[in-house]
Image: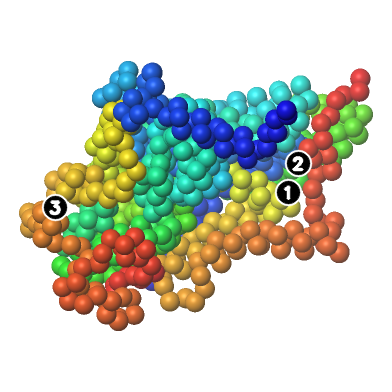
Amino acid sequence: MIDTFVLVIATVVAAATPLLLAATGELVVERAGVLNLGVEGMMLIGAVTGFAVTIASGHASLGIPAAALAGAATALVFAVLTLTLMANQVATGLALTIFGIGLSALMGASYVGTPVAPLPKLHLPGLSDLAVVGPLLFGHDALVYLSVALTIAVAWFLKHSHAGLVLRAVGESAESAHSIGHPVIAVRYLACLFGGAMAGLGGAFLSLSYTPMWMEGMTAGRGWIALALVVFGAWRPWRVLAGAYLFGGVTILELHVQGANGIGLPPQVFSMAPYLATVAVLTVISAGKWRGRLNAPASLGKPFRPSV
Amino acid sequence: MTFHISRRTLLAGSTATAATLALPRGARAEGPLKVAYVYVGPIGDHGYSYSHDQGRKAVEVKFADRVKVTYVENVAEGPDSERVIRQLATAGNDLVFATSFGFMNPTIRVAKQFPKVKFEHATGYQKASNVAIYNARFYEGRAVIGTIAGLMSKTGVAGYVASFPIPEVVMGINAFTLAARKVRPDMKVKVIWLNTWYDPGKEADAAKALMDGGADVLVQHVDSPATMQVAESRGAYAFGQASDMARFAPKAHLTALVNDWAPYYLERVKQALDGSWQSGDVWWGLKEGMVKLAPYNPALPENVRAAADKVKADITSGALHPFTGPIKDQKGSLRLADGQRIGDADLLKMDWFVEGVQS
């Protein structure tokens, strides 16, 4: 029973990690006032690059940074188009997703059907061997820990660092930030690159750990869930973390309910649950005294052209 | 005198012209035959769409200059597919293969508007004068892998990663379960529905959930090799789907249910070329080679191979029908009396599970 529980939790962690990585990246992008809907495309490009570099070099330790770089490079395209050339962010983001789906399929065509060794689980002598707690906390691969560490770092950065304050100012009111001398466009560029890198890491987790292989369109909509998670988490890193694990947990729970048989609820109810929860959370935080906590960056999605 | 052309007279006129201009059978217009394929997934899925694309390649190789073959992949079932199929018909294709169940209604609708274009729809049940249907008796292969699963399982629980509860999938689950219980009467088959044909992550999650529930043999009716990988990493057995997936799971992969559409595609394209194409209804299986099994895993014990080969040979010869009574349903009531066989019509609308299925 305990063993099963540990295995189930490990599955939930795996389901949540790519969502957490991509959503935390997008959170930073949106807190800087930019809406990048291209998460799905950036994840796919990260997934295929991470996979290809790992196969070519034989080291996932090279594949993972390469995935982040590829994600950032894809985001750079978006940033140039929307920040420098002032293209519409929504349209450009959607185009980026479609572009990413196609480009990743092209890049990955020769890797289809190639297996790769999954990322090794970290083994900490002593800790990993503890009963229950060991496999639960110390039995995952590096990207899982990286995703949590990066979320903590982002939370700290946004709340406690000067640069984080500048980034939030840029997202709340680009004009004000500009008028007191902050480089709005530069900050937004950096935020976009970070978001792309995180999406790339999320993709690499899919192709190197979750299902260690390359398949066209293997993100299967996770980029869109990551976008929803940012809203669900009201643009706060901790809530995004909780949301990612909740989404992951509910998807896995649905499968277990089906496997267990005999529970009266149809599985479709569980498939709907995360989305119902998103709607419910949005309704609650948008209404009445909670309203102030919705926290959407005031300049989100608005292009900014420096007046001087 | 004025001519009044209404939409109706115009249409009537054009139909009449089309009729008089209609070429005699066998005399096709000049130029290569234009053939198009519509796939539900990416051809790189290494599963279902991949297997159809192997068939397309065979057509290209065999007929070379006499055909011009195109394909569209990743076409969502439903309205989007109607747009794609109509586009292909408009583009002057002579023969269109719509390869997924959910393309059925769109194909029928487009076929009405393009009576001269020949359509072929895979795994559906609606026919028209210019829409032929074709399908493979996958359940025959599933009876073979069910036999292997029953003999190889230690826990007596098999896990089934399933896509949509349509007759095609339901009859596969039933054939698998019946065969497994024939060699191991207490065998249980747990089913998880994903409501998608293709989502590697979710397929892997379902496979893990099934193993957590006690399954030590996994079967899938979804398209990616994710289930294979889970079985490999957790020490279970699994069966590939649509193509040989052994490279993803050298230890876990016992055999695979392989679709070989090439013989059918070659024949139909040949008929379209020489003018003998007619609408039809084909349901081929092990005997015709449309359903095959990948080479067994070298580690598969001799007695299991023998049992599997026997089932395969008996189905091929017609001595064995996977759905032969007595068959009880999930609730334990008798559905089919001793010795009776389920007819094709009943198989194609199967909506109940046999005893031993947990869904």
Q: Do pointers 2 and 3 mark residues of a single chain?
A: no
User: Which label lies toward us, 1 or 3?
Assistant: 3
Q: Which residue is rendered at x = 85% and y = 56% of the image?
A: A292
Say whether marks 1 and 3 touch (CB < 8 Å): no
The one nearer the camera, B348 or A86, is B348
In the figure, A117 relative to A237: above or below?
above
User: Percent x, y for residue B137?
Assistant: 26, 53
Q: Which residue is rendered at x = 27% and y = 44% of the image?
A: B259
- Label 2 resides on the chain identified as A
The one nearer the camera, A29 or B266, is B266
How far apart in space, not on screen, are marks 2 and 3 (Cα)?
Answer: 64 Å
User: Percent x, y for residue A194?
Assistant: 65, 33
Q: How packed is label 1: few (under 14 Cα within 10 Å), some, or many (20 or more)? A: many
Q: Residue beneath label 3, please?
A: B316
- Label 3 resides on the chain identified as B
Mark number for residue A235? 1
N-terminal of the pair, mark 2 or mark 1, is 2
Image quadrant in which you'd find residue B120 = top left
Whether residue A12 is visible, yes or no, is yes
Is residue A182 shown left or right of residue A26? right
User: Percent x, y for residue B292?
Assistant: 21, 46
Q: Which residue is rendered at x = 13% and y = 46% of the image?
A: B298
Figure disc tally: 3
How far apart in space, not on screen, are marks 1 and 3 (Cα)?
Answer: 61 Å
Say whether marks 2 and 1 touch (CB < 8 Å): yes
Mark number for residue A31? 2
Image quadrant in which you'd find residue A51 = top left
How far apart in space, not on screen, are marks 2 and 1 (Cα)?
Answer: 7 Å
